[in-house]
Image (cartoon, helix red, strand yellow):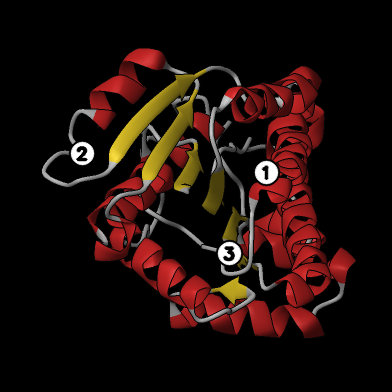
Amino acid sequence: MKRIIIITGASSGLGAEFARQVYAQKSTIGMEMWLVAREADKLNQFAKTLVGKNIAVRTFAFDLSGTDGAKRVKEILDAEKGKFVVDLLINNAGFGTYGPFTETDPAREMSMIDLNCTSLTGICGFVLPHMQRGSRIINVASLAAFLPLGNFAVYAATKSYVLSFSMALAAELKERGISVCALCPGSVSTNFANVASNGKRRDVLHGCDPRKVVTHCLRASRRGKKVALWAPKWKITAFMSRFIGRYIGARFTYLFNKRPH
């Protein structure tokens, strides 16, 4: 039976790093890796860097946003011939927007919800029938999931949804032997800030090495962990968020954590 790995947002950042590390694992020899991202040229160029191993790589370039994006994934699964199982699903596709809500584009905020929440939910729903005991799901949330954040309101809310959904899904799938892990990174050195700030902040401040974040997450997922937090400071922040009022956290970050937009 064919075993498949699906990674969304796979052309750059954490998605590309997930693809590189999963591709390099001995346990994935003989599997098929599906990489999904919006930009065809960038995705195909990245896929060409994955060489030297007996694992087939297929690329699918389309916009994953919303219901339509998730349905495209279902169409690909439905069109697959022969028996197969999805061994690993990594829902990485997503983006953020900096700035006070009143100063951001509502259409862009709604698009963020479509990708970060609606698409991720639909993909999980469409892929799960093709999973079996031992299969794993990794949903990329954020350290922002633990508190409402001023100047980051919608993004933090979407990632709070991803974390909550992932935990509930993990509880529901326990008897089926399918594990779900929410990756909740803080600042990581990717192109995230450049997109979120509309080019006004090219690099993430104090960004951590994405290789270490992904390595830790994959290990945590294999061990059945529900949440992956690599850096000690992230673990402390997540823990301390339990003792901070939600409004106080939002107000403090709005006043003292300005983000270029």
Given the image, on which type of amino acid does mark 3 rest? Cys
Q: Quadrant of the C terminus?
A: top right
Instruction: From the image, state whether disc 1 or disc 2 is nearer to you.
Output: 1
User: Whole-Å distance between the Cαs marked 3 and 2?
Assistant: 26 Å
Residue linked to disc 3: 184
In percent of width and height, residue 106 lies at 80, 22
Cβ atoms under marks 3 and 1 closer than 8 Å: no
Q: Spatial distance from mark 3 to mark 1, Cα to Cα?
A: 22 Å
Residue that carries the numbered disc 2 in the rendered image = 50
Mark 2: give few (<14), some (14-19) or many (20+) Cα within 10 Å: some
Number of labels in the image equals: 3
In the image, residue 213 lies at what x, y percent?
Answer: 39, 65
Q: What distance separates the C-alpha of mark 1 from that of mark 2? A: 24 Å
Vertical placement of residue 113 versus 215, above or below = above
> In terms of secondary structure, where does tag 3 sit?
loop
Is residue 50 found left or right of 181 in the rendered image? left
Mark 1 lies on residue: 127
Looking at the image, is mark 3 or mark 1 nearer the viewer?
A: 1
At x 30%, y 37%, the residue is: 56
Side of 81 where 158 appears, left or right = right
Residue at image position (37%, 35%) is 202
Q: Is residue 91 visible?
A: no
Q: Amino acid at mark 2?
A: Leu
Which numbered disc flags the more N-terminal residue, 3 or 2?
2
Q: Hey, which quadrant is residue 137 in on the image?
A: bottom right
**Which element carries disc 2, helix, strand or loop?**
loop
Badge number at residue 247: none
Residue type, label 1? Val
Question: Left or right: 167 with respect to 245?
Answer: left
